[in-house]
Image: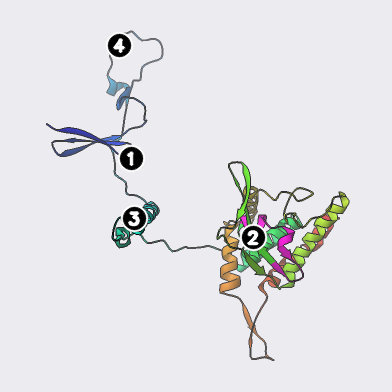
């Protein structure tokens, strides 16, 4: 009688005997072991060598490897496999090994539609007010992410050489991340430099005050200010930016204290949905034309309610 054993990728073992498949199970461990063991329950104390008891009455527990259950691959896994095979087959077409790419005719799972959950305008105002309370630098970081939609790594990699206060322009050129305990500054996610224009006086004022605080600290410490310094840093010379994980945890903690379930990347969605896709408009009676209202200034008014306390903290 023919007999063979198939070991699957997931660790399950299937025996094929005379064309009939019989699932053995998914092993608990990769080491050599018994698939079924019994944990005997005995009274405390040393027992005789030839102890015989009723396992059912004593409540002994049998431990065995569970039967194998086939689980389908996730849709994302199937899409990744399709992408790998399609790229390999496309190379074969270029090398004239095959006539066409069969992966083009394969039907892959549909990419789920993103469902971002940005904060509402009222929640954004509460977040802005809470961010200015502990300190002006943290408030400036949250404000800049909210009104520009920059990624966390992009705002942390900003240097003063990338900011033109006179023109109200911010150049996004680099990413700052930490991987394996090492700080890495690299290209942006899209591998493209872009410029963000902020003509509103509120954002220019925030960046101007941030620059003034940096230069004042440099004068007090008798160090020379530099355009290569990072905008957001705990170090006096601003030679190293904030830790990315610390920024994420601090923002999440601030939102939990406000009773909000939000994360830092949601501010990027807020900038895209509230400030760009659905900008508020108002119509002036003296002009028939539509005019866009400065949404950043609206949020800034909320932050100004805590400005006196911030100035007292600055001393």
Q: Secondary structure at mark 2?
A: loop
Q: Secondary structure at mark 3?
A: helix
Q: Closer to the camera: disc 1 or disc 3?
A: 3
Judging by the rendered image, the residue that carries numbered circle 2 is 173
Disc with the residue nearer the chain's start (3 vs 4): 4
Judging by the rendered image, the residue that carries numbered circle 1 is 9
Q: Tell me the CA gap for discs 2 and 3.
A: 36 Å
Total marks shown come to: 4
Judging by the rendered image, the residue that carries numbered circle 3 is 92
Q: Tell me the CA gap for discs 3 and 4.
A: 69 Å
Q: Closer to the camera: disc 2 or disc 3?
A: 3
Marks 2 and 3 in Cβ contact (< 8 Å)? no
Nearest the viewer among 207 and 283 is 207
Residue 44 in picture, x, y percent from top left: 41, 14
Q: Secondary structure at mark 4?
A: loop
Q: Secondary structure at mark 1?
A: loop
Marks 1 and 3 in Cβ contact (< 8 Å)? no
Quarter of the image for residue 54 reads top left
| Residue in the image at 66% along x and 48% along y | 243
Nearest the viewer among 96 and 12 is 96
Residue 73 colored in magenta in the image = no
Quarter of the image for residue 300 reads bottom right
| Residue in the image at 69% along x and 65% along y | 170
Judging by the rendered image, the residue that carries numbered circle 4 is 51
Residue 133 in picture, x, y percent from top left: 74, 57
Disc with the residue nearer the chain's start (1 vs 2): 1
Q: Tell me the CA gap for discs 1 and 2.
A: 43 Å
| Residue in the image at 32% along x and 8% along y | 49
Marks 4 and 2 in Cβ contact (< 8 Å)? no
Q: Residues within 10 Å of mark 2 (few under 14, many from 20)?
A: many
Up-down relation of residue 299 to residue 11 (above or below): below
Magenta segment range?
152-169
């Amino acid at each position: 009688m023919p007999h063979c054993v198939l070991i699957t990728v997931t660790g399950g073992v299937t025996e094929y005997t005379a064309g009939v498949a019989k699932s053995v199970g998914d092993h608990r461990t990769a080491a050599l072991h018994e698939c079924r063991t019994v944990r005997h329950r005995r009274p405390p104390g040393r027992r005789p060598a030839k102890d015989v008891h009723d396992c059912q009455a004593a409540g002994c527990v049998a431990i065995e490897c569970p039967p194998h259950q086939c689980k389908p691959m996730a849709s994302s896994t199937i899409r990744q496999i399709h992408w790998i095979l399609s790229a390999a087959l496309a190379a074969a077409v270029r090398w004239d090994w095959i006539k066409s790419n069969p992966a083009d005719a394969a039907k892959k799972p549909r990419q789920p539609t993103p469902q971002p959950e940005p904060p509402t305008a009222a929640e954004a105002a509460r977040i802005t007010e809470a961010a200015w309370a502990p300190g002006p630098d943290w408030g400036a970081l949250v404000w800049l992410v909210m009104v520009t939609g920059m990624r966390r790594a992009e705002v942390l990699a900003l240097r003063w050489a990338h900011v033109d206060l006179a023109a109200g322009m911010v150049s996004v050129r680099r990413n700052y991340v930490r991987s394996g305990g090492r700080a890495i500054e690299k290209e942006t996610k899209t591998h493209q430099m872009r410029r963000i224009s902020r003509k509103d006086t509120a954002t220019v004022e925030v960046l101007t005050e941030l620059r003034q605080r940096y230069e004042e600290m440099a004068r007090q410490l008798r160090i020379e200010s530099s355009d290569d310094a990072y905008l957001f840093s705990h170090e006096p010379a601003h030679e190293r930016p904030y830790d990315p994980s610390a920024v994420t945890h601090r923002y999440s903690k601030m939102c939990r204290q406000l009773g909000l379930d939000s994360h830092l990347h949601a501010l990027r969605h807020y900038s895209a949905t509230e400030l760009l896709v659905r900008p508020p408009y108002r119509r002036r009676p003296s002009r028939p034309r539509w005019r866009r209202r400065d949404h950043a200034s609206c949020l800034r008014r909320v932050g100004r309610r805590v400005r006196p306390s911030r100035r007292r903290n600055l001393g």
